[in-house]
Image (cartoon, rainbow, N blue to C red):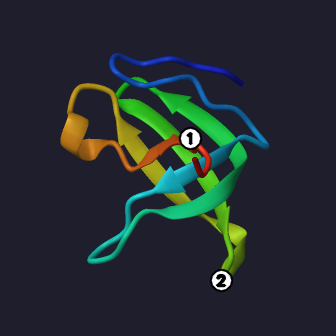
Amino acid sequence: MRRTVSGEKSMKVNDRVTVKTDGGPRRVGTVLAVEGFNEGTMYLVALEDYPLGIWFFNESDHAEGVFVEPYAGEG
C-alpha cells in the first residue's frame, strides 16, 4: 500500500528509512508493512536490534509527529 499524507513522502514495503527514537540519533531500518489511517500512517520498521520490526506512527497533520522518513543514503 502506498499513501501520501500532507508533508509526508510516500514510503512502501522494503524502502530504507530512518526513524526518530527517544534520546538518540535517527536509526536506519527497512519498512516491513504500511497501514494507512485517517490520522496518519503506521509503519512496521525492522531495525538492527529489532529485526522483526517495531510500529511507528506518522501523524498526518503534525510535523513533530513524523517519526519515519525516507533514507537519503550516505553522501
- Residue 49, compared with residue 14, is above or below; it is below
- Amino acid type shown at disc 2: Asp
Residue at 34% x, 16% y is 6
Q: Residue furthest right?
A: 14
- Residue 38, compared with residue 69, is above or below; it is above
Q: Which residue is mark 1?
A: 72
- Amino acid type shown at disc 1: Ala
Q: How far apart are labels 1 and 2 at the CA level?
A: 21 Å
| Foreground of the two, 62 or 72 | 72
Q: Residues within 10 Å of mark 2 (few under 14, many from 20)?
A: few
Q: Residues within 10 Å of mark 1 (few under 14, many from 20)?
A: few
| Foreground of the two, 6 or 72 | 72
Percent position of residue 8, x then y = 42, 25
- Residue 39, compared with residue 6, is above or below; it is below
Q: Is residue 39 left or right of residue 70?
A: left
Residue 49 marker: 2
- Observer-side mark, 1 or 2, equals 1
Q: Residue furthest front?
A: 75
